[in-house]
Image (spheres, grey):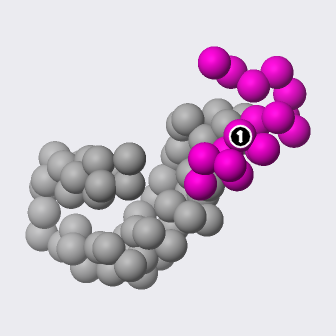
């Protein structure tokens, strides 16, 4: 269910614990990301993010392998 206002969306995201900052910190600690830029594309409710992640774990991995690594980490966060 979508939040009716931006304020309500921000409150929902804060209470769920899924914020761009929390995701960034988790990525830095789990896959050793050296650069993380995360933008909440959902208007503040925490349902959709656009992310740029740089990590030595991605080195010499195909795009598919990098996505699988990210998907594995997302499952752990759920």
Residues drawn in magenta: 1-17
Q: Position of residue 75 (x, y in %)?
A: 29, 48
Residue visible at 71% across and 40% down in the picture: 12
Residue visible at 13% across and 63% down in the picture: 61
Q: Name the outermost residue toward the front.
A: 15
Q: Position of residue 68 (x, y in %)?
A: 18, 49
Residue 26 can be seen, yes or no: yes
Residue visible at 57% across and 51% down in the picture: 18
Side of 74 relative to 49 (left or right): left
| Residue 13 magenta-highlighted | yes
Residue 40 can be seen, yes or no: no
Give the SS element for disc 1: helix
**Rendered image quadrant of residue 66:** bottom left
| Residue 53 magenta-highlighted | no
Q: Quadrant of the N terminus?
A: top right
Callout 1 environment at 10 Å: few (<14), some (14 to 19), or many (20+)? some
**Residue holding disc 1:** 12
Q: Foreground residue, 78 or 37?
A: 78
């Amino acid at each position: 269910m979508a939040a009716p206002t931006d304020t309500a969306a921000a409150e929902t995201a804060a209470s769920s614990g899924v914020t761009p900052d929390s995701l960034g910190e988790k990525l830095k600690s789990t896959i050793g990301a050296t650069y993380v830029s995360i933008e909440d594309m959902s208007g503040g409710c925490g349902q959709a993010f656009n992310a740029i992640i740089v990590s030595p774990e991605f080195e010499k991995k195909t795009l598919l392998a990098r996505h699988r690594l990210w998907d594995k980490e997302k499952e752990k966060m759920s």
